[in-house]
Structure formats: C-alpha cells, structure tokens
Amino acid sequence: MEKNYFYPSEPYYVKNQECLYFNYHFQNNIFYTISFISTEKGNNENQKSTQKTWIRFVRIIKKQDGTLQLLLDAEASGYS
C-alpha cells in the first residue's frame, strides 16, 4: 500500500537546522519511506538553484517493556 502526501500549491519553507513537522499518525511496526525534495535558491542571478532528494526509511517498534524505539534505514527495513 502506498500513500502520497504532496501539496505543490502549499510549499513548506524551512531554514537550516529547522525540524520538519509531519502531521501523520505513525503506527507501530509499519515500515515507512519518507522522501522529499528540497530546493535551495542561488545567491545571485548567476547562480542557479539546486535540488536534492532526501529519503529515510523508518519503523517504530514497541519493546517488551512498553517503550517505543525508532529504527532508521537498514535497521528499519531489516526488522522482522
């Protein structure tokens, strides 16, 4: 199953070192792929803007003691 949340009419502006907010209810032990494209404007008219694609794989698991743990990338995809 795949769900895409893409709102090109509502750009999301962030600054360096700022967190991205996801208004999404993540469920336990579900493998998620989160990806987005960032665009950085050039410093002047001669410098073009640059784009970069960002991808992370995540999974939230509930441990036997009841605490939650966030697994990232290979650890998230290889968890069974």
Image: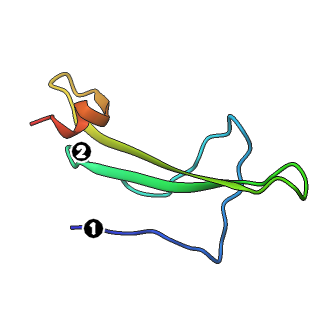
Name the outermost residue toward the front.
46
What's the amino acid at mark 2? Asn
Taking the spot 15% from the left edge, 34% from the top edge, the residue there is 79
Name the outermost residue toward the right.
44
Name the outermost residue toward the left.
80
Question: Whole-Å distance between the Cαs marked 1 and 2?
Answer: 17 Å
Label 1 vs label 2, nearer the camera: 1
Q: Which quarter of the figure has residue 71?
A: top left
In the rendered view, would you say 44 is above or below 5?
A: above
Question: Which mark, residue 64?
Answer: none
Give residue 14's position: percent from left, percent from top: 71, 49
Q: Which quarter of the figure has residue 7?
A: bottom right
Give residue 26's position: percent from left, percent from top: 34, 51
Question: Which mark, residue 28?
Answer: 2
Taking the spot 28% from the left edge, 27% from the top edge, the residue there is 67
**Of marks 1 and 2, which one's residue comes earlier in the chain?**
1
Name the outermost residue toward the bottom.
9
Left or right: where does residue 75 sit relative to residue 38? left
Question: Which mark, residue 2?
Answer: 1
What's the amino acid at mark 1? Glu
